[in-house]
Image (cartoon, rainbow, N blue to C red):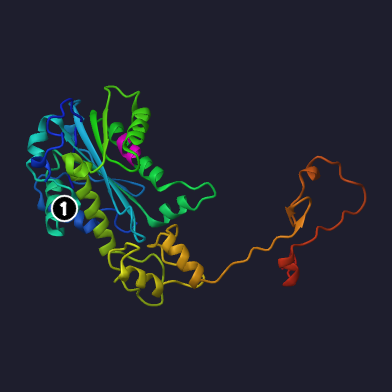
């Protein structure tokens, strides 16, 4: 898997131009990685580096201090099933014409066979193209969005992009241009990235735009890496849960509006646990289905101590001196009283 976007001081080949438009496995299984290595002569062993839900390749030729341009895009933002995958692709500015000639284009405009072929070409151009893939599991997406103080999907996306840029810079790549397919308002997003990396030397020129995947080839390459990665993860999904019988993977596109996906969700909801880890619990489609199909949970609380839940000590208890003599036993919560449950010290 090779894709590298070296920062460049020239943008002549990254201006909008119709002529230029053209876990679970995080990206590849180990077998697929080995196959890619065997297919491409000269691939050094262990060139793939792993982080938490990340996979990346930084060619040594991109660590020479020459300007590099980098593009970022995602796949799987809208589906209710599976990971959201972000990818970055980068190469030297001076090699931009050669990279454009490879035929990268918006992954949504390509059929599966063409996408897979371009992805393999990226892997085999491992000395010129660098890439980073960040797969964000459905459990992480939902967990962050359902926190007491929710993390928006936009922020999750922005954080992933910033993290990939930081990783490439930390590897010694001289990134001077970054192109990003926007999430949210492009001006706000661009100012955010400029603020995060404004201290970097040499300066990085950021371009955040709508439909950047069809306008800038580094973003096109990133979109292909992200799309192929997500498609393979869904196609080859291995259930984390130990089900008594195998679950069907006939869930269609994974989008909430897909009738096959909606039917799959209805058939595979558990009345207590909801859904497998493939499903994003934070989506309204999932929440509404759980409210209808799953068992309700009641949290019993008794009001005392000025509105504090039963069994909760008032702050005054920590500052007032304790009275002499036997202490009054603390009243147990109604839940435990009704079930005859007592605290024991010995068995």
Q: In this view of the protein, can residue 278 be seen by the observer?
A: yes
Q: Using the image as rendered, state which of residue 333 and residue 344 is in the foreground.
A: 333
Residue at left offset 45%, top offset 68%: 289
Is residue 108 placed above or below 275 in the rendered structure? above
Q: Residue 201, located in which quarter of the rendered image?
A: top left
Where disc 1 sits, the SS reads helix
Q: Position of residue 159 (x, y in %)?
A: 38, 40
On the rendered structure, is 26 left or right of 269?
A: left
State the residue position of label 1. 109
The part of the chain drawn in magenta is 161-166
Query: Magenta span: helix, strand or loop, mainly?
Result: helix
Residue at left offset 25%, top offset 50%: 226
Q: Residue furthest bottom?
A: 245
Q: Position of residue 22 (x, y in %)?
A: 11, 46
Q: Residue 214, located in which quarter of the rendered image?
A: top left
On the rendered structure, is 234 left or right of 42?
A: right
């Amino acid at each position: 898997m090779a894709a590298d976007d070296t920062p460049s001081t020239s943008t002549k080949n990254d201006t909008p131009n119709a002529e230029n438009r053209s876990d679970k496995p995080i990206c590849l299984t180990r077998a697929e990685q080995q196959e890619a290595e065997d297919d491409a002569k000269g691939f050094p062993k262990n060139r793939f580096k792993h982080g938490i839900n990340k996979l990346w390749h930084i060619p040594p030729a991109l660590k020479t201090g020459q300007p590099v341009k980098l593009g970022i895009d995602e796949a799987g933002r809208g589906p209710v099933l599976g990971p959201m995958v972000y990818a970055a692709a980068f190469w030297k500015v001076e090699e931009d014409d050669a990279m454009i000639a490879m035929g990268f284009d918006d992954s949504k405009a390509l059929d599966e066979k063409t996408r897979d072929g371009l992805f393999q070409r990226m892997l085999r151009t491992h000395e010129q193209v660098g890439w980073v893939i960040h797969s964000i599991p459905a459990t992480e997406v939902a967990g962050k969005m359902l926190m007491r103080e929710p993390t928006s999907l936009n922020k999750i996306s922005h954080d992933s992009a910033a993290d990939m840029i930081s990783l490439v810079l930390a590897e010694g790549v001289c990134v001077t241009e970054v192109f990003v397919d926007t999430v949210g308002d492009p001006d706000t997003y661009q100012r955010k990235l400029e603020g995060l990396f404004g201290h970097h030397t040499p300066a990085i020129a950021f371009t955040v735009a709508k439909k950047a995947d069809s306008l800038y080839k580094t973003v096109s390459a990133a979109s292909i890496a992200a799309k192929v990665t997500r498609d393979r993860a869904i196609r080859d999904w291995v259930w984390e849960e130990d089900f008594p019988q195998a679950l069907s993977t006939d869930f269609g596109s994974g989008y909430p509006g897909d009738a096959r996906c909606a039917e799959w969700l209805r058939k595979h909801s558990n009345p207590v646990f909801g859904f497998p880890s493939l499903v994003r619990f934070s989506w309204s489609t999932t929440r509404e289905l759980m409210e209808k199909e799953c068992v309700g949970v009641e949290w019993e609380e008794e009001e005392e101590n000025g509105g504090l839940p039963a069994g909760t000590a008032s702050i005054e208890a920590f500052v007032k001196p304790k009275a002499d003599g036997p202490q009054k036993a603390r009243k147990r919560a109604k839940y435990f009283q009704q079930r005859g449950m007592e605290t024991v010290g010995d068995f």
